Amino acid sequence: MRRASFTDMNCSVAQSLEIVGEWWTLLIIRDALFGVTRFDEFSTRLGIARNVLTQRLDTLVEHGVMTKEPYQDNPVRYDYRLTDKGRDLWTVITALRQWGDKWTTDGGAPVESTHACGNTMTVEPHCSACGERVETADLRVRPGPGARENNPLNGLRSRNAQPS
């Protein structure tokens, strides 16, 4: 069953979900971030049906998240490589992994990220202007330069914010 399209929704989250919102897609991107580039390797690692993998990779290529580069001529076979647009999803994947480590695992994190300094690291939101750590209670939303009249955030406040 095909889900409803968000193409008419004036919301960056909804527009992003149009491209990466299908569950296999984020797993493909996760593996690509770890260096997987070949169709057969994605297929084997993920246990995904070949037709579904083809559709997901085609969508990622169509939207500029990955490139498709031939590495063999007869038969033609391709490497799928993340573009800058695709590599920018690292923070999204990392945030989702950290959330899963906290809320969905019983025995601890299945994977830990270590920084070049040798320490286990986490991604934490900090204000790009002042450098302070951002908490949900600190957030406010307002229409941005691309907002239209039908923007779903118009008139919202941060209702889920917790008092400090």
Image (cartoon, helix red, strand yellow):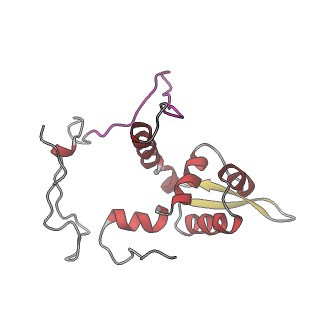
Residue 115 within the segment the image draws in magenta:
yes
Considering only vertical position in the picture, is 3 above or below 122? below
Farthest residue to the right: give it: 74
Q: Position of residue 31 (x, y in %)?
A: 60, 48
Residue drawn at (56%, 70%) of the image: 62
Q: Is residue 15 left or right of residue 69?
A: left
Side of 153 relative to 100 (left or right): left
Q: Examine the rendered structure and indicate whether residue 21 appears above or below residue 121.
A: below
Q: Quadrant of residue 15?
A: bottom left
In front here: 159 or 29? 159
Magenta residue check for 149: no
Left or right of residue 85: residue 143: left
- Residue 151, compared with residue 158, is above or below; it is below
Looking at the image, which residue is at 59% across and 65% down? 56
Q: Which is nearer the eye, 50 or 11? A: 50
Q: Residue at x 26, y 69 (%)?
A: 146
Locate the C terminus by quadrant. top left
Residue farthest along the top direction in this orientation: 118
Task: Give the magenta part as a residue range.
Answer: 109-126
| Residue at x-position 74% and y-position 55% | 40
Residue 54, image x, y percentages: 66, 67
- Indicate left or right for 45 with 111 as reference: right
Residue 100, how many percent across, how many down? Answer: 43, 42
User: Principal SS element in the magenta part?
Assistant: loop
Total numbered badges shown on the rendered structure = 0
Residue 11's image quarter? bottom left
**Which residue reaches farthest front?**
106
